[in-house]
Amino acid sequence: MRRLTPIIIATLWPMLTAGSCATTSEPRVEVREVRVAIPVRCDPQPRPQKPVLPDHTTAPDIFEGVKRLLVRDKLRAAYEGELEAALAGCTGD
């Protein structure tokens, strides 16, 4: 009887371990809502009109040239402000 015990264990052991694999539970399905930002092309309307900037190189003297440069800087800054406002309308800022 002592010789049969290892044979019986060797025979039954694979069946017992294989039986435990057959009792797996069903996978649980979980549905979640995920919010993802989707990039959308923004075309601001109406578009700000690009200003005509004065040319300082055709000024008759340096003082008039500096005045034109100052005006040019103010016009460009105002145009950039309008563009930023239009883009902020697209992004919602």
Image: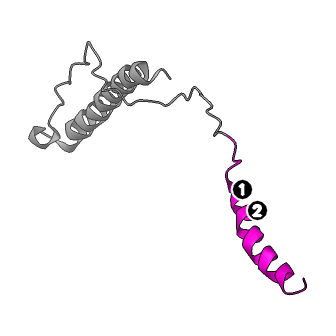
Tell me where the magenta segment starts and ends, as one range.
Answer: 1-25
32 vs 68, nearest the viewer: 32
Q: What residue appears at the point 26 percent right and 19 percent down from the top-left corner?
A: 48
**Mark 1 crowdedness (10 Å alpha carbons): few <14, some 14-19, many ≥20:** few
| Location of residue 70 with respect to 2 vertically, above or below | above
Q: What residue appears at the point 53 percent right and 27 percent down from the top-left corner?
A: 35
Label disc, if present, on residue 16 of the rendered structure: 2
Check whether the beta carbons of the residues at disc 1 and disc 2 lie within 8 A of each other: yes
81 vs 67, nearest the viewer: 81
Q: Position of residue 82 (x, y in %)?
A: 35, 22
Q: Position of residue 54 (x, y in %)?
A: 17, 31
Q: Which residue is mark 1?
A: 19
82 vs 73, nearest the viewer: 82
Q: What residue appears at the point 38 percent right and 31 percent down from the top-left corner?
A: 39
Q: In the rendered structure, which amino acid carries the disc numbered 2?
A: Leu
| Location of residue 47 with respect to 35 vertically, above or below | above
- The stretch drawn in magenta includes residue 21: yes
Left or right, residue 38 beside residue 53: right
